[in-house]
Amino acid sequence: MAYAYARPCPSPAYVTAREVAAVSLTHPVASDHQLARLLQIGMVLEEVVEARAYKHHETLAADELDADIVELLEEAAEESEEHRKRLEELVDELEADPVAYEEIEALVAARYEAEADFDGVLYDQLCNEETAYKFYDDLIGAIESSEVTFSIDRERLLTVLREIREEEKEGVEEVTRLMEDRP
Ligand SMILES: [Fe+2]
């Protein structure tokens, strides 16, 4: 998928990932430590997506939620949880000093509280999925362009990240379909 941030995308996860990732993903990954940090940023990103999907579901009035949207939000939350766990497994395998997860989380803490525009649940979901796709795409590129030997098998690492990226892409397509189907 040729990717570009084609529209203004106000989702907190989007803002966060761009802020956090911009400084880290423009160069090849240089060490286990840096790889661990980037994977942890991914974990936080997934956590934000998960939290927002639940929050949308909770906050929206029943008459605003049709079955398609409920299903989408549930799937998005479940998928993010699974992605987070897969990233955590990779981090655990790395021979890197544990990075203070709280430090990374603190970067996005304020974002959890951001007021959502609930007219735009689908739009917000779209931004989240696109952000995640872009994040993994950049991360894969930064690993591919790195010549470092990581303490984790590179092919396994890339396989997991490519699988997750593929699921984000499917997420973007699914939300886009739902948006197109709506009046
Ligand atoms: Fe994800």
Image (cartoon, helix red, strand yellow):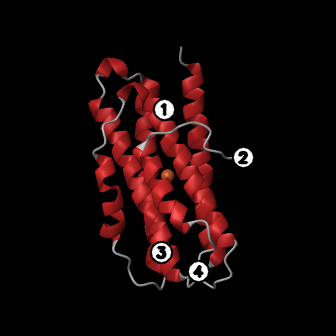
- Which is nearer the N-term, disc 4 or disc 3? 4
Q: What is the spatial separation of the Cα atoms under label 1 and label 2, in whole angstroms?
A: 19 Å
Badge 2 marks a residue whose secondary structure is loop
Report if the beta carbon of the residue with label 3 is closer than 8 angstroms to ligand 1: no
Q: Amino acid at mark 1?
A: Tyr
Name the N-terminal-most of marks 4 and 2.
2
Distance between the Cα atoms at labels 4 and 2? 26 Å
Chain-order first, disc 1 or disc 2: 2
Q: CA distance from mark 1 to mark 3?
A: 31 Å
The CA distance from mark 4 to mark 3 is 11 Å
Report if the CB atoms under discs 1 and 4 are less than 8 Å apart.
no
The percent coordinates of residue 115 (x first, y second) are 30, 37
Disc 3 crowd rating (10 Å Cα; few below 14, some 14-19, many 20+) is many
- Determine which of the numbered discs, if any, sits on residue 102 in the image: none
Indicate which disc residue 36 carries. Answer: 3
Q: Which residue is mark 2?
A: 2
* Residue 148: percent from left, percent from top: 64, 83
Which x, y percent locates residue 106?
Answer: 30, 62
Is 58 on the left-hand or right-hand side of 66? left
Q: Which numbered disc covers residue 123?
A: 1
The residue at 58%/80% (across/down) is 30
Q: Residues within 10 Å of mark 1 (few under 14, many from 20)?
A: some
From the image, tell me which residue sits under label 4: 30
Q: Circles 4 and 3: CB distance less than 8 Å?
A: no
| CA gap, disc 2 and disc 3 | 27 Å
Work out how far the residue at label 1 is from the one at label 4, CA to CA, in angstroms: 35 Å
Inspect the image, locate mark 3, and give the three-letter code of the amino acid beneath it.
Ala
Mark earlier in primary sequence (1, 3): 3
- Residue beneath the point at 55% across and 26% down: 178
